[in-house]
């Protein structure tokens, strides 16, 4: 089984690190094999080694997650190939992965698309906005996590 879950946004300093932290936190409460899954994030246009944005850090701290150790990284073939599933923040990220990686990953989703209902599948970029925008992004991610966990349970299940 591939070794990690991958979250992707543009610069890997706002949305995808928040998604990484929240999903990793949720997986720790799951039984094996989900508990051992690692979550990593990357950006379509990221620089190596940048810190998480201040408002992303504050939004996570408000729900008890300290992610100050985080450092950004660009999206690579190795990260794509090693992923059990890839979750993008916007349709433009998914399109760039589909165009830029041949073959594209089999399990490629928008972070919120599995919720169903009439929920918006995209998570808007809060970069440069007020803290409330980052908190809104965080809450949109939290809302999507149960549907992502349902998918990961299926993908991580041993073959019958």
Image (cartoon, helix red, strand yellow):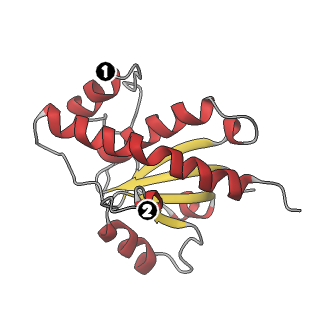
Q: Secondary structure at mark 1?
A: loop
Report crowding for label 2: few under 14, some 14 to 19, many 20 or more residues within 10 A (C-alpha).
few
Observer able to see residue 128 = yes
Q: Is residue 46 above or below residue 95?
A: above
Residue occupying the far right of the picture:
160
Q: Which residue is mark 1?
A: 62
State the image coordinates of residue 133 (x, y, percent, origin top left). 17, 40
State the image coordinates of residue 137 (x, y, percent, origin top left). 27, 43
Q: Which mark is residue 116?
A: 2
Q: CA distance from mark 2 to mark 1?
A: 27 Å
Q: Is residue 110 above or below residue 69?
A: below
State the image coordinates of residue 105 (x, y, percent, origin top left). 56, 71
49 or 27, nearer to the observer = 27
Q: Could you tell me which residue is drawn at 30 percent across and 70 percent down? A: 92
Q: Is residue 93 above or below residue 39?
A: below
Q: Could you tell me which residue is drawn at 47 percent across and 65 percent down? A: 109
64 or 76, nearer to the observer = 64
2 or 147, nearer to the observer = 147
Q: Quadrant of residue 37?
A: top right
State the image coordinates of residue 156 (x, y, percent, origin top left). 73, 53
Report crowding for label 1: few under 14, some 14 to 19, many 20 or more residues within 10 A (C-alpha).
few
- For the C terminus, give its image quadrant: bottom right
Q: Quadrant of residue 120?
A: bottom left
Q: Is residue 36 left or right of residue 38?
A: right
């Amino acid at each position: 089984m591939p070794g990690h879950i991958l979250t992707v946004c543009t610069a890997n300093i706002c949305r995808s690190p928040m998604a990484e932290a929240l999903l990793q936190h949720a997986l720790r409460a799951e039984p094996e094999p989900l508990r051992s899954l690692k979550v990593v994030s990357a950006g379509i246009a990221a620089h190596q080694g940048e810190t998480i944005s201040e408002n992303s850090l504050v939004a996570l701290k408000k729900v008890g997650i300290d992610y100050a150790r985080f450092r950004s990284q660009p999206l690579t073939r190795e990260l794509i190939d090693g992923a059990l599933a890839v979750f993008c923040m916007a349709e433009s990220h998914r399109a760039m992965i589909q165009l830029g990686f041949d073959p594209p990953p089999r399990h490629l989703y928008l972070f919120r698309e599995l919720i169903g209902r009439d929920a918006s599948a995209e998570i808007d970029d809060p970069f440069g906005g007020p803290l409330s925008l980052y908190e809104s992004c965080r809450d949109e991610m939290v809302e999507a996590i149960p549907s992502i966990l349902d998918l990961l349970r299926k993908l991580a299940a041993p073959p019958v």
